[in-house]
Every structure is written in C-alpha cells, then in structure tokens.
Amino acid sequence: MKEADLIKFIEKKGDTEFNSAVISWINASQNNQALFSKIKAKHVIDTLDSNTESTLATRKYNEFLEKKKAAKKPLLFLLKVASVIILPLLLSTYLYFNNQNSTTNKEEIAFTSSVKEQKTVTLKDGTVVWLNADSKIILDHEYNSEERRLKLYGEAFFDVVKNKDKPFIVETVSGIKIKVLGTTFNVKSYSSEKNVETTLVTGKVELYDQKEDKALFTLSPKQKATFSKKEKELSITEVATENITSWKSGRLIFDKTPLDEFALNIERWFDVKVIIASNNFKGYSFSGKIDKTNSIEDIMKVLEVSSNLNCTYSKNTNTIVIKSK
C-alpha cells in the first residue's frame, strides 16, 4: 500500500470501496498496522502548524511555554511537544479506533448497471459477476470473512470461486436465497416481474427460504427453478441454459415468453417504454432472438412478422405501442 493512499484514507478523501481496501490491508498484519500508525503520526505532526489554534497539542504547548519561558525556537518545540503528546496517543489508541471502524463502519458496497448497460464485476474473492441491464448487487464490508453474502436486485450471472469454508449466498427481494460453494448460475430477480428464476449451468446450488434452515430444493445443471412471488410456489424445469445466459454476449433469446415479460426485457435493454394497448393479447407468447445491435424498428418488425400484432413508435415520447392489426 502506497503512503499516498494511506494519507488519502487518513484525510477521509476515499470512497467506500477504497476505504474498505485500506482497512483490509491494515488488518492484514502487525507490520501494516505499525506502518500505518507511523504515517498517521507523521501526517498529523506535519499539518499541526496549520491547525495550532484549535488543537489540544497547541494548548499543551502554550502551557509548557508559560512554565518554562525559555523557548527560543517555537516551531521546533511545537514539533517536539506535539510528538510527545500525539504519537503515544496514536500508538495506544490506534487498535481501539481500528476496531471501532471494523464494528461500526457498516458501509455497504454496491455495484450497479444502468438501463441498456451490461457490466462485469470481479469480487475480492475472485468471483466474477455479470450484471444485466438495470441491476444491482450489494455487499457489506464483511464479505468474504466468514461467508460470502450479497443481495441481488435485477439479473446477474455468477461464476463463483469454490471455497467450502465460505458459502456463497445470494439474497433476492422475494426472500428466496441461493447457496453455493463454487459453480456457475444465473439469477433473475427484478422487482417488476412476477417470478424469481434461478438457472444452474454447472455445479450445484441449493435454494432456501428466508430462514435458511432447510434447503427447499437442490438444482442440477440445466435445471431452472421458478419461484412465484404471489403463489409462493417453486417449480423446476429442464432448460437450454445457453438461451437464458445469452444476454451476457449481447443477445436475448425468447422461447414462448409472455408478451408482458418480453416488453419488460425490451424496456431494460433499449431504454424505451413499451405499452401493450389491449389486455386481450397480453397472454400472447413470443419466440425469437433480439440482438443488442438491433434498432427499435428491427424489434417491431420481428414482432409483426411473427404474430398478428401491429407496432408503432413515437420518437417524441420514446414509446412503442403494441396493438392488434
């Protein structure tokens, strides 16, 4: 860790992710703790001359001058007295304040992707997470200490580094939790959708409810678990996983997908509002492929050719309206 980075941390100029990295480095060894204490003490001493009117060191120094009345080099004495007063305090209280940080500094670390954006994130244990459009994962500063737990809002694909001593747990807004040791899987958990879907590509995952006391089901590769938020029911199906995870490579593949679910995917991927003009055909299912490079016009043509639907687009309101022909 560079001295400049430690000073940045001391001056509280770093963001949450930076502060978490520095704290982890400090806690890694006694040598790191000693170096940090030394740099912090030096930094405080170096900046005392700009804060002398408001510091405890200045008051102690003025009292010292009144008693001795023999100081000839005020700046030199200031540094000496400040060193005597501050350095021992820093050394003796460093571990206390560091422990305070580790117990009360409960900042959460968030990684987000905006509408139209896909993002790849590598966590500090080496696990790689792909975020689909309009998605977010949240970790706290204790991630990878005893366990690896995060919250998911939206859709993500996980390539989890195996560690049998530290289970990897994904919490969704529905209350369903996914627990693994090391595997690859996809979770789709948007608040705007009726279901939470967990699709296993390789390895093994266990599905739990909020209590996490007993697994509801253990998935095998090429199985998808669909949890209905309304009915609180879990169903398992065999799937072609490449169709579900194709979004990572810039393609959405639909297989008898309900029209309202199709519309939500298009809205997230292309930042456009989709209105289904009639409830009479909301039950229509769509099968086909949409690429990230497609235009709005391309999407409407695909819908019209494959169905008895008609689409119009308003550039002013950035809205696609789907209605019958």
Image: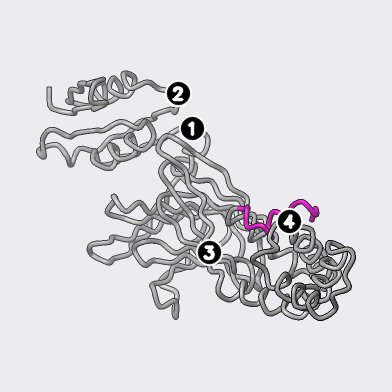
Is 171 or 217 nearer to us in this picture?
A: 171
Look at the numbered discs 4 and 1 and tell me whether their residues touch, using CB distance below 8 Å.
no
Q: Quadrant of residue 287?
A: top left
Look at the numbered discs 1 and 2 and tell me whether their residues touch, using CB distance below 8 Å.
yes
Helix, strand or loop under label 1:
loop
Residue ID for mark 1? 250
Write the residue at 28% across / 61% down: 229
Look at the numbered discs 2 and 3 and tell me whether their residues touch, using CB distance below 8 Å.
no
Residue 297 point in image, percent of width and height: 31, 18
Residue ID for mark 4? 7
Q: Amino acid at mark 3?
A: Glu
Residue ID for mark 3? 107
Q: Quadrant of residue 56?
A: bottom right
Write the residue at 70% across / 60% down: 22
Residue 291 point in image, percent of width and height: 43, 27
Helix, strand or loop under label 4:
helix
Write the residue at 62% across / 53% down: 14
Instruction: Evaluate whether residue 180 shows in this view.
Output: no
Q: CA distance from mark 3 to mark 4?
A: 20 Å
